[in-house]
Image (cartoon, rainbow, N blue to C red):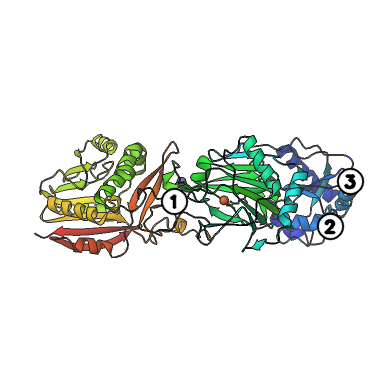
Amino acid sequence: MYFNDQKERRLGEKLDGPKLRKRLGKSLEQLKRHDPSVEVADKPTQILFVGNSSVMCGVSLEELEEIFTVYDGNCQFIVYPNKRTYSFVQFSSVEQSQKACDELNGYTSPVLKTSHLPFVIAYVENLPQESIAPEFRPKDLEIIDDFVNEETEQAILDVIYSNPKAQSMKHRAVVHYGHEFDYGSNAAFKPTDPIPDLFDKLIDRFVQEGYIKERPDQITANIYKPGDGIPSHYDTHSAFENEIISLSLCSDVVMDFKDGANSATIAPVLLKGRSLCIIKGESRYRWKHGIVNRNNDVDPRSNRVVARKLRVSLTFRKIRTQPCQCSYKEFCDWDREGEMCIPSTANAALKLEQTYVADVYENIAAHFNETRHSNWRAVQNFINSLPRYSVLYDVGCGNGKYLAPKDDLIKIGCDMCMGLCKIAAGKNTNVIRADALHLPFHSAADAVICIAVLHHMSSFERRQIVIREILRVLKPGGRACLTVWSMDQSDSEYSNMRKNKEESNELCELTREAKRLRIHDGKQFTQQDLFVPWVSDEKETYLRYYHIFRDGELEELLGGIDGCQLESITREQGNYVVIFKKIK
Ligand SMILES: O=C(O)CCC(=O)C(=O)O
Ligand SMILES: [Fe+2]
Ligand SMILES: [Zn+2]
């Protein structure tokens, strides 16, 4: 429909008479359908309904501002990200709205870069009722609107601006009080300007009103120009106590909270000017927070576009002096005797796999089963190549997807997960509950498959034991087919998703210590040992330990084992498929 219009209209042209009335009529019909609460006025009012002015018509908020602020520098815009073809502009006086209406009604402004449609304008009595959708928030996050009044807001701003030390960072300007956080080392503090009296009074209120127990001793003022943001980050556990309070001033802004266990889960939260945001518990220890660099936000509750103005925030934190004892240890940078690190002892490796492999599979077995149907091409080819009546062991058979099909092979599987054994046995297969390091078989196999198992072994020694066990149960001359996850995901169907732009310059990020096991965020692998989240049907997140293989690593592993002859290593969908033979 817009194509015809584009041909008809020329920029700077003004439509009037019956044509304009007809267009306006159509636009007002849409208004009636989508926003029946809005009443069209029969005489001039301060609020203009502006048809053909939405994002859907290719008109940006910036263009609207350029066109309408000529009549009133303080006019307010109500615009929508989609679904509407119109916007609303509210003026300070009827005179101003009348002048804008007279000059712009039916006019195709040359300011418009994409749209060539004339604005069709009507006076309305009221703005649409905000349909407030419930906002999804991370657990333990608290927002208190109108925590300070406008007078206090101004007084706080005066204090901040009186500080000559506003050091300029790439985007934001930052001023510290009490102690200075050293972004370079991520954890060191040095004393700096004392906390001003006015801020101390705010802290009194935080304590009195029960938002915090202990007084913060470190305050950061962030000054954001419209368009500025702050990268998604954790406020480091080891650096600060639990409660973190952010007081927003001047502009509204949307802060995005990202689930640390599943970065695809984002909760946008509107922080209004003069509101308090208390980040504690799960919302502080498990979720990252950040503000995207952009000029306007979409209010997650009303779906309206909110233009950003200059925003000032005060973040109140207490410096931690004792070890962090949060229950979110996967996200905690405090070293707890190496529990979340690459294991350095045999016992630690066993414990890690028990918690982050065995227990997890018991919990997710049913859901895991629902997602495991298709077979790897290379594995299927390997099975198809076996002579009739060959004995095939499936080490870590999971839900039994390779055991179930009836063929001329004698197949026995094992898995250490009871839930998966039950599911596999339910498919009329032979299954034994056993782990890959202690195979319950004699050396009777013509072939072994071991699919997506070895990457759950958390030490080189344990990976070697699995290979030795496979060789032990093979007849001389028998062959094994084994798959593991590969660092290189370029041939994976998810490769585009995984290559998402790296989050720029993550701030106060968990320690970058190489030994630390971090949570895979679905992007490219940046370390070999990590946790991969599994989100269950009930939206519970479980972390599974993985060792991701780099190029050449399987050759090294197999090369060090007597009686093992490497036949081939191929790649399939981000995995290595290796075939080897027992030669003695
Ligand atoms: O501006 C804000 O509200 C948050 C600032 C922040 O997250 C920080 O300084 O760590
Ligand atoms: Fe923060
Ligand atoms: Zn912690």
Q: Is residue 384 visible?
A: no
Where residue 526 sits, quadrant-wise, is bottom left
Frontmost of labels 2 and 1 is 1
Say which residue label 1 marks: 333
Question: Residue 161: x percent and y percent?
Answer: 73, 56
Task: Give the left or right position of residue 239, taking residue 467 as reference.
Answer: right
Task: Tell me what residue is drawn at x 68 percent, y 37 percent.
Answer: 131
Residue 494, position as x, y percentages in the image: 42, 55
Q: Considering the image in quadrants, where does the C terminus appear?
A: bottom left
Helix, strand or loop status at disc 1: loop
Element under disc 2:
loop
Q: Which mark is residue 70?
A: 2
Give coordinates of residue 159: x percent, y percent: 73, 53
> Hey, what amino acid is under mark 1?
Asp
User: Image point 28% across, 48% down: which residue?
Assistant: 348
The answer as to whether callout 1 falls within 8 Å of ligand 3 is yes
Judge from the rendering whether residue 28 lies leftward or rightward of residue 433; answer left or right: right
Inter-mark Cα distance, 2 to 1? 53 Å
Q: Amino acid at mark 2?
A: Val
Q: How crowded is the residue under tag 1: few (<14 C-alpha within 10 Å), some, or many (20+)?
A: many
10 Å crowding of disc 2: few (<14), some (14-19), many (20+): few
Q: Earlier in the sequence, mark 2 or mark 1?
A: 2
Left or right: residue 53 versus residue 15 is left
Q: Is residue 152 visible?
A: yes
Badge nearest the viewer, 1 or 3: 1
Would you place residue 372 above or below residue 559 in this image? Answer: above
- Dot 3: few (<14), some (14–19), or many (≥20) neighbours within 10 Å? some
* Residue behind mark 3: 94
Residue at x-position 25% and y-position 44%? 397
Q: Amino acid at mark 3?
A: Val
Are discs 2 and 3 less than 8 Å apart at CB? no
